[in-house]
Image (cartoon, rainbow, N blue to C red):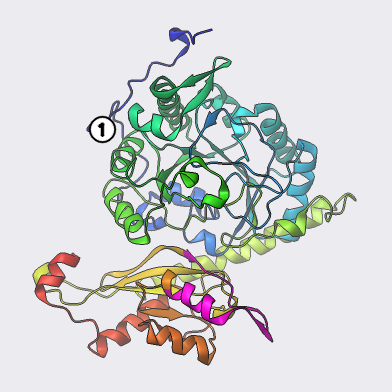
Amino acid sequence: MDPKPHRIIEIPVTVQGGCSNPKPSAGSGCGTGQNGGLPAHIQAKIQDHPCYSEEAHHHFARMHLAVAPACNIQCHYCNRKYDCSNESRPGVVSEVLKPAQAIHKALTVAAGIPEMTVVGIAGPGDALANPTRTFATFRGIREQDPGIKLCLSTNGLALPQHVDELVALGVDHVTITINSIDPEIGARIHPWILWERRRVFGREGAEILIRQQQKGLEMLVEQGVLVKVNSVMIPDINDRHLKEVSRMVKEKGAFLHNVMPLISDPAHGTYFGLNGRRGPTEAELSALRDECGGNMNMMRHCRQCRADAVGMLGEDRGEEFSLERIDQAPLNYDVVRERRDQVQASIRERMAARKRQGDTVTSMPSARPVAQQTTRPVLMAVATKGGGLVNQHFGYAREFLIYKATPEGVRFEGHRRADLYCSGPDACNDRTQVLASTVRALEDCEVLLCARIGIEPWSVLEAAGIMPNGEHAMAPIEDAVMAVYREMMAAGRLDMSEREAIQCA
């Protein structure tokens, strides 16, 4: 049976070159992705949400509950596999949970990881294609612990019909994946959707999806829900179009835009991967984020987490809390909640103290016009275990955070995954291969900050033009980056020509 036109919510489909129904956005448009570019009331709501706040992701943990196996659209970049614990990407889980299991797991994780502030449902399918399972899980957690933030990610197709229930349950953070606002482009990414109990293909399906996404976004904003939009950057399909997406979602009230790179390893079995569609380079991704940042606050700390991720961003402790391992005995949850509240209050106090003393630490005044600014920016890689500190040994880093230092201050740029150099104090992997991989990942960085580093990797990195630095161990990351930048400036290593200054600006 064909979908009935009157059942489709009539929102004009926005195509390249224009946006419909403009309205003031919650975002400030600073484009930095830092909390400082957001209104105070939004900063207060995301201060301990690691998936929404770049600062919070250093200190607080999250967990995703895999209770939603079904999906209502097909994406060419997705292939949902189960029992694949070594993969870290959306749509992958080791076990799908029933709501009762998920509720118990959430409370158990809250007991074991007191830094956990957020429980989200992000798959492995779509949370709102499985509404009974999703809402039963949220209700159970809300009844047991009203202090845990509830968060949901969705493709938006079924969003409008569930907004009221989300609000009633206190879900005040929602992420919508919007990859296009042009149905021709959308059809190249999403070949079909499930609508009115049948598959709708191509442009027709993309039009319905786009209408539903925009309507759901508007409805959430009207109800006071914070909305983040995710977009997958797919070279030669939607990469140039995503600037239009960013402008539209800001106008409709989203406060944050997260442009993520396409993951296209053929081993994952996705349509794009198997057909040779490449992911963007780091430079392409950074440039697009900067272009979108002219309109919108940009998220740069996303890790494209598994649908069952547990712990801080950049780590996954899910195996510690598998159904086999968690104790089925009842928890003394009053004690758990009290300890968790104490830990989180302490973290917030440290963050507030750091903010009070840090506003002038990571910036240097510069009143010179562009043509006279002759100090170039520098990218630096940082090995960290969390807490916003330079506190990890190079050999144990599975990823590096990337920061850009300029005379105006320090900006977080993103992260780069790396192979583990050491698996123990006396056991190292293939050093030549691992170091070569790390050099490729960090080839545009000039400095690597870490707590410690051995002579061999130091020599290899230095020879590649990446200077290791262990002099700022346990220092706050932004302070350390700016301190090294000042040292480079004082040594005359940052001078550039007037032409280069204009191009850099």
Residue plotted at (61% across, 36% down): 125
Q: Which residues are magenta?
A: 416-439
Q: Choose between 261 and 473: the one closer to the eye.
A: 261
Residue 424, above or below 136 = below
Residue 10 quadrant: top left
Residue plotted at (88% across, 49% down): 330
Left or right of residue 329: residue 315: left
Residue 162, above or below 103 = above
Q: Quadrant of the N terminus?
A: top right
Q: Quadrant of the C terminus?
A: bottom left
x and y percentages locating residue 164 in the rendered image: 56, 25
x and y percentages locating residue 217 in the rendered image: 44, 31
Q: Which residue is mark 1?
A: 16
88 is within the stretch colored magenta: no
Total label count? 1
Left or right of residue 64: residue 495: left
Identify the amino acid type marked 1.
Gln
Q: Choose between 266 and 427: the one closer to the eye.
A: 266
For label 1, the SS is loop
x and y percentages locating residue 172 in the rendered image: 54, 39
Query: Does the image show residue 479?
Result: yes
Residue placed furthest toward the right: 329
